[in-house]
Image (cartoon, rainbow, N blue to C red):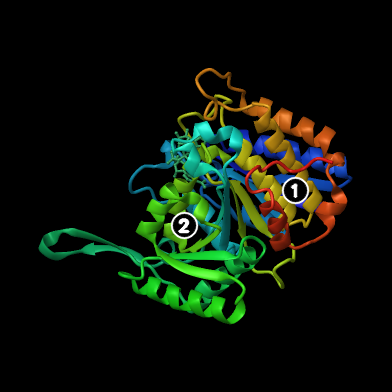
Amino acid sequence: MKALIAVLPGDGIGPEVVAEGVRVLRAVAERFGHSFVFESAAIGGGAIDTEGEPLPARTLALCRRANAILLGAVGGPAWDKPGAAVRPEQGLLGLRRGLGLFANLRPVRVHPRLLAASPVKEERLRGVDLLVVRELTGGIYFGPSARDNGENGEVRAIDSCVYSSSEIARVVRVAAELARGRRRRLTSVDKANVLETSRLWREVATAIVRDEFPDVTLDHLLVDACAMELIRAPARFDVVVTENMFGDILTDEAAVLAGSIGMLPSASLGAAPDASAPRLGLYEPIHGSAPDIAGRGIANPFGTLLATAMLLRHSLGLHAEAAAVEAAVYATIDEGTLTADLVTKDERAASTSVVGERVTARVNTDAMSISTSNARATSSPAHETRRENARTDTPTISIT
Ligand code: NAD
């Protein structure tokens, strides 16, 4: 396969973790006989400095031409000044909106080796294997906002949350399709006791699942209750679907289950002719630019490496290759090659590049022994997820 992969390292630790992602993708190309072309472009704070805007036209054009996009993170204190006319995050929001990437997939699995890295009790973490599908291009982050003069000469600020029924329907469909490939349980999260947009969300979710996915069990949960349940009983969740801001907050909370925010990957997908078709996607770790540790070579690259596996699966349709990367990541965790955010106080931490080298070496040596016939048996992301689900408790891919 030939593929063009747009590489947007961004700010802070972004370039450090993305370098490891590219290294692993190069190894995949070599091992499996593909031709991947990598083209880099600026985004975020760095793009503001060099080109005056957080999403230069050249970057957006590259992303439109590409088969997939690998991104690090954007932002940092240098661009955080209150009242700044342009902000790094506008680059990310512009990319999501410009490419119509409306569904954000954030899988959370707890690796048995990392149980101690989480502050949550081990018995609550066993069996956690959930997928949050977050709506990404609507809601309060994209609604009209303003400042005006309120009563008594006060300054007033307004952010509006807006959702249409079609925006809700398309993301609920993605989530229900993914649930169909897993344990067939979908939890829709809203704040229907207070918000009108949430009442519409609940109505649409109920109708879509009833009419189109009768084999999927749907339940509704208020966002405050969901925040509590994610810590109290996280293993109860299969697929969670929710609106933009709730998803943003809940997925950072869910990251605590996995031991570190550096562990979690995400995929942002647009529309496709059918659920199994490869489609343009943006792949990134869920963390930010972590300015407090940038430049020290200690950032955890596992989230980015798992994001490359999602890229191979969802945008390139390369299922065996995705499984090989995941197997290499889990084997590296198993052997205890871990960054500083994951080690216990008696263990020695590995650097970002050592982790990347170990995962790459495993892709090179172990990849061909993964059962490719098994991995190629289906081309549907949904089916892929079902296979993954079979190894919920031990997320190690079987090596035959
Ligand atoms: P953050 O995710 O950057 O960092 C939160 C904490 O987690 C920090 O202590 C950091 O050191 C740690 N951390 C994050 N990723 C890590 C990794 N891979 N390995 C080890 N430790 C890691 O969130 P923040 O501090 O709130 O934000 C910093 C900047 O990033 C801000 O400018 C914010 O706007 C931006 N941000 C960008 C994105 C994105 O690009 N998608 C997302 C969130 C925040």
Crowdedness of circle 2 by 10 Å Cα count: few (<14), some, many (20+)? Answer: many
Q: Is residue 62 above or below residue 187?
A: above
Q: Position of residue 389 (x, y in %)?
A: 66, 53
Q: Residue furthest left?
A: 152
Q: Position of residue 261 (x, y in %)?
A: 51, 40
Q: Residue 247 has which mark?
A: 2
Q: Amino acid at mark 1?
A: Ala
Q: Is mark 2 within 8 Å of ligand 1?
A: no
Question: Which of 99/109 is in front?
Answer: 109
Q: Amino acid at mark 2?
A: Gly
Dot 2 or dot 1, earlier in sequence: 2
Q: Position of residue 88 (x, y in %)?
A: 48, 47
Please identify the quadrant where the C terminus is shown.
top right
**Is 158 left or right of 13, judged from the image as shown?**
left
Does residue 300 appear anywhere in the picture?
no
**Is 360 left or right of 91, judged from the image as shown?**
right
Q: Residue at x 83, y 53 (%)?
A: 374
Q: Is residue 106 above or below residue 290?
A: below
Question: Which of 181/303 is in front?
Answer: 181
Q: Residue at x 77, y 52 (%)?
A: 4
Question: Which of 12/191 is in front?
Answer: 191
The residue wearing badge 1 is 322
Secondary element at tag 2: helix
